[in-house]
Amino acid sequence: MPRPIIDNPNTILHEDINDMFKTKKENDFDILFSTLNLILMKNERNTDMIDLFNTLEMSSFIKVLHLFDGRTVQFTEANKFTDALILAIVYYLREVENIRDWDKVQEYFGSYKLDRLSIALKIHNLNEFTKQKIQEQLRKLKI
């Protein structure tokens, strides 16, 4: 069974595009996406969008495109995202799972060595930030 070009179509046009290609072969999809890639390469000065197109599934790409519609987006560096992910995991382990022993937290990360002091400070700052945001919301609600 052929795959849809656009998963979860949210417009009639998307549904029509899927209908056009529902009897096509995988090779036809490759030709279509290669052609679209060439058109993007021709029309776009910034190759970042082409990289994003080549990375995401069509439906996800369309969602991102509509979400940012013409705006410039600057992503964080990958290592900063990794740091944020590690912080979120440690925060979850310490604050939600209540694992206070740093050695037990470290076990979840295997050979990756956590900077305990730095992470403890970041957790403290995150808690302060969260309190501040809650207070702002309560002030808006006048509670």
Image (spheres, rainbow, N blue to C red):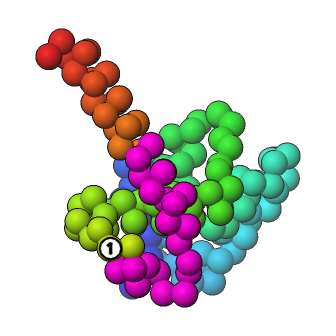
Q: In the rendered structure, which segment of residues is drawn in magenta? A: 103-125
Residue 64 falls within the magenta-colored stretch: no
> Residue 25 appears at what percent x and percent y?
54, 83
At x 68% / y 56%, what residue is drawn?
A: 77
> Residue 123 appears at what percent x and percent y?
42, 52
Indicate whether 36 appears above or below 108.
above
At x 41% / y 47%, what residue is drawn?
A: 124
Q: Amino acid at mark 1?
A: Asp
Q: Residue furthest left?
A: 143
Left or right of residue 98: residue 24: right
User: For mark 1, what is the residue?
Assistant: 101
Indicate whether 55 appears above or below 74.
below
Disc 1 residue crowd, few under 14, some 14–19, many 20+, Cα 10 Å: few
Left or right of residue 92: residue 25: right
- Dominant secondary structure of the residues highlighted in magenta in the image: helix
> Residue 70 appears at what percent x and percent y?
65, 34
Left or right of residue 47: residue 51: left
